[in-house]
Amino acid sequence: MDQSAIIDEQAIARLRKIGGDSLLVEIMGLFTESAPAKVQNALRANEQGDLNQVERAVHSLKSSAGNLGAMQLMEMCGRIEALASAGKADQVSALTDELTEAYNQAAARLQAIRQTLDQAD
Protein backbone atom coordinates (compact mmCIF):
# COMPACT_ATOMS: atom_id res chain seq x y z
CA MET A 1 0.00 0.00 0.00
CA ASP A 2 1.26 3.43 -0.90
CA GLN A 3 1.92 5.20 2.41
CA SER A 4 0.73 8.52 0.96
CA ALA A 5 -2.71 6.98 0.43
CA ILE A 6 -2.82 6.25 4.16
CA ILE A 7 -1.42 9.58 5.43
CA ASP A 8 -0.99 12.61 3.19
CA GLU A 9 2.51 13.83 4.00
CA GLN A 10 1.53 17.31 2.80
CA ALA A 11 -1.06 17.51 5.58
CA ILE A 12 1.63 16.56 8.09
CA ALA A 13 3.93 19.20 6.63
CA ARG A 14 1.19 21.84 6.86
CA LEU A 15 0.60 21.09 10.54
CA ARG A 16 4.32 21.28 11.22
CA LYS A 17 4.51 24.60 9.38
CA ILE A 18 1.59 26.02 11.39
CA GLY A 19 2.70 24.93 14.84
CA GLY A 20 5.88 22.92 14.62
CA ASP A 21 6.34 19.40 15.88
CA SER A 22 4.58 20.24 19.16
CA LEU A 23 1.27 20.97 17.40
CA LEU A 24 1.62 17.87 15.25
CA VAL A 25 2.31 15.70 18.28
CA GLU A 26 -0.63 17.25 20.14
CA ILE A 27 -3.06 16.63 17.27
CA MET A 28 -1.75 13.11 16.80
CA GLY A 29 -2.24 12.49 20.52
CA LEU A 30 -5.82 13.73 20.40
CA PHE A 31 -6.51 11.46 17.45
CA THR A 32 -4.89 8.47 19.17
CA GLU A 33 -6.98 9.09 22.28
CA SER A 34 -10.35 9.65 20.59
CA ALA A 35 -10.36 7.69 17.34
CA PRO A 36 -10.53 4.14 18.76
CA ALA A 37 -13.71 5.01 20.67
CA LYS A 38 -15.23 6.57 17.56
CA VAL A 39 -14.52 3.42 15.56
CA GLN A 40 -15.97 1.26 18.35
CA ASN A 41 -19.03 3.50 18.62
CA ALA A 42 -19.65 3.15 14.90
CA LEU A 43 -19.24 -0.64 15.02
CA ARG A 44 -21.46 -0.99 18.08
CA ALA A 45 -24.14 1.28 16.62
CA ASN A 46 -24.05 -0.74 13.41
CA GLU A 47 -24.53 -3.98 15.35
CA GLN A 48 -27.51 -2.36 17.11
CA GLY A 49 -28.95 -1.14 13.80
CA ASP A 50 -28.66 2.51 14.86
CA LEU A 51 -27.69 4.18 11.59
CA ASN A 52 -28.08 7.67 13.05
CA GLN A 53 -25.39 6.89 15.64
CA VAL A 54 -23.20 5.26 12.98
CA GLU A 55 -23.50 8.43 10.94
CA ARG A 56 -22.55 10.64 13.89
CA ALA A 57 -19.58 8.47 14.88
CA VAL A 58 -18.07 8.27 11.39
CA HIS A 59 -18.71 11.97 10.75
CA SER A 60 -16.65 12.86 13.80
CA LEU A 61 -13.96 10.34 12.86
CA LYS A 62 -13.90 11.70 9.31
CA SER A 63 -13.13 15.18 10.60
CA SER A 64 -10.37 13.94 12.88
CA ALA A 65 -8.86 11.86 10.11
CA GLY A 66 -8.98 14.78 7.70
CA ASN A 67 -7.08 17.01 10.11
CA LEU A 68 -4.16 14.58 10.02
CA GLY A 69 -4.36 13.74 6.34
CA ALA A 70 -5.58 10.18 6.95
CA MET A 71 -7.11 10.18 3.50
CA GLN A 72 -8.09 6.53 3.20
CA LEU A 73 -9.79 6.59 6.60
CA MET A 74 -11.48 9.91 5.83
CA GLU A 75 -12.83 8.57 2.52
CA MET A 76 -14.08 5.36 4.14
CA CYS A 77 -15.87 7.39 6.83
CA GLY A 78 -17.44 9.54 4.12
CA ARG A 79 -18.74 6.48 2.29
CA ILE A 80 -20.18 4.97 5.45
CA GLU A 81 -21.67 8.31 6.52
CA ALA A 82 -23.48 8.68 3.20
CA LEU A 83 -24.75 5.09 3.30
CA ALA A 84 -25.93 5.44 6.91
CA SER A 85 -27.66 8.70 6.06
CA ALA A 86 -29.42 6.94 3.18
CA GLY A 87 -30.54 4.10 5.47
CA LYS A 88 -28.52 1.44 3.67
CA ALA A 89 -27.77 -0.78 6.67
CA ASP A 90 -26.57 -3.79 4.65
CA GLN A 91 -24.02 -1.68 2.77
CA VAL A 92 -22.84 -0.04 5.99
CA SER A 93 -22.36 -3.47 7.56
CA ALA A 94 -20.38 -4.63 4.54
CA LEU A 95 -17.85 -1.82 5.11
CA THR A 96 -17.17 -2.24 8.83
CA ASP A 97 -14.10 -4.45 8.30
CA GLU A 98 -12.73 -1.91 5.82
CA LEU A 99 -13.34 0.88 8.33
CA THR A 100 -11.40 -1.02 10.99
CA GLU A 101 -8.57 -1.76 8.55
CA ALA A 102 -8.37 1.86 7.38
CA TYR A 103 -8.20 3.02 10.99
CA ASN A 104 -5.52 0.45 11.87
CA GLN A 105 -3.40 1.49 8.88
CA ALA A 106 -3.74 5.19 9.72
CA ALA A 107 -2.91 4.60 13.38
CA ALA A 108 0.16 2.53 12.48
CA ARG A 109 1.41 5.13 10.01
CA LEU A 110 0.88 7.96 12.52
CA GLN A 111 2.76 5.95 15.13
CA ALA A 112 5.67 5.58 12.70
CA ILE A 113 5.65 9.33 12.08
CA ARG A 114 5.58 9.95 15.82
CA GLN A 115 8.58 7.67 16.34
CA THR A 116 10.47 9.58 13.67
CA LEU A 117 9.71 12.84 15.49
CA ASP A 118 10.80 11.34 18.83
CA GLN A 119 14.09 10.18 17.32
CA ALA A 120 14.73 13.66 15.93
CA ASP A 121 14.55 15.17 19.44
Image (tube, rainbow, N blue to C red):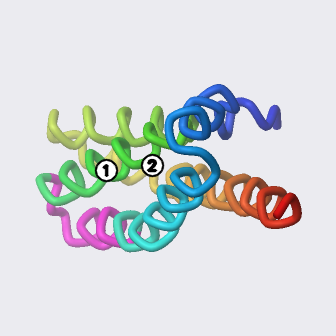
Q: Which residues are magenta?
A: 40-51
From the viewer's perspective, tell me whether residue 100 is left or right of residue 4. left
Q: Is residue 108 above or below residue 81?
A: below
Residue labelled with disc 2: 94
In the drawing, what numbered circle is on residue 58?
A: 1
Name the amino acid, label 1.
Val
Q: Measuring 57% from the left and 30% from the top, which residue is drawn there? A: 14
Asked if marks 2 and 1 touch (Cβ < 8 Å), the reply is: no
Label 2 crowd (10 A; few <14 / some 14-19 / many >=20): few
Q: Secondary structure at mark 2?
A: helix
Instruction: Tell me: residue 76, above or below residue 64.
Output: above
Which residue is at 16% across, 59% downward? 53
Q: Is residue 50 left or right of residue 28?
A: left
Which quarter of the figure has residue 2? top right
| Residue plotted at (26% across, 57% down) | 57
Residue found at the far top of this picture: 10
Between 12 and 83, the one lying in front of the other is: 12
